[in-house]
Image (cartoon, helix red, strand yellow):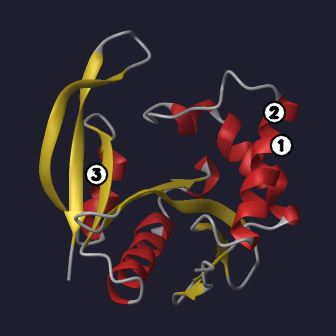
Amino acid sequence: MLSRTLETERLRLRRYEEKDIDTILEIMTDERLAEYKLVTYQDLSKDEKINLIKTWIRESKLSLEEKWVIEVKDTHEVVGNIVVNSVIKKPNYCNVGYTILYKYWGNGYATEALKAVSYYLLNYRNYYLVECSCNENNKRSIRVLEKAGFIQDGYINNRRINKDGSYSRVLYYSKKI
């Protein structure tokens, strides 16, 4: 199924397009955004990152991936992205991740986008559950999850490595109808 465009009061969530390459590249390379991420792209060259983004764009046109850029409706500025990271067919749930460009933090965009995507996944894609995970130190992301109606289910100890070499728990949050 092709990722459909989703709209909220302030945002339009749409499939990746060629014009988004620079913004997605910024998301991939900003160290502030990678601080708590499980997957970072720091080891890839700029060309490898651009090729990966082009693959994502191609896959979104073939309906292989559910990835959206988060765009402010009034200004058409792309402020971040939100993606289905993985799908677990049995027992029918998916994992969602999101990133907001640093200069747009604190505007409620992540919460608004996560509410829209989780509603879509639960009500139109018929997932039993939508899951998100984050580093226990990522207080901003925890707040987004809770404001979006997700409830903490549990955690796994010593799963994410921090910049200082220590390990942190991964917290798991979920939402269902």
Left or right: 163, with 135 as reference point: right
Which residue sits furthest top? 165
Residue tagged 2 = 48
Q: Say the numbered circle drawn on residue 173.
A: none
For label 1, count other residues whose C-alpha is less than 10 Å away and answer few (under 14), some (14-19) or many (20+). few
Mark on residue 142?
3
What residue is shown at x 34% (from left), y 40% (from top)? 138
Task: Name the outermost residue toward the left.
Answer: 154
The numbered mark at residue 51 is 1
Asked if the residue under mark 1 is in contact with the one under mark 2, i.e. CB atoms within 8 Å, the reply is yes
Is the Cβ of the residue at disc 3 closer than 8 Å to that at disc 2?
no
Name the residue located 30 percent from the left edge and 12 percent from the top edge. 166
Task: Find numbered disc 1 in the image and state the secondary structure of the residue it sits on.
Answer: helix
Q: Quadrant of the N terminus?
A: bottom right
Q: Going 62% across and 85% down the picture, which residue do you hit?
A: 5
- Dot in front, 3 or 1: 1
Q: Secondary structure at mark 2?
A: helix
Work out whether 122 lies above or below 175: below
Q: Earlier in the sequence, mark 3 or mark 2?
A: 2
Q: Disc 2 versus disc 1: distance between alpha carbons?
A: 5 Å
Q: Nearer the viewer, residue 35 or 1?
A: 1
Indicate the amino acid at tag 1.
Asn
Mark 3 residue element? helix
Badge 2: residue crowd in 10 Å (few <14, some 14–19, many ≥20): few
Q: At label 2, which amino acid type do we have?
A: Glu
Q: Is residue 65 left or right of residue 94?
A: right
Indicate the position of residue 146 as horizontal and vertical percent values: 23, 63
**Discs 3/2, front:** 2
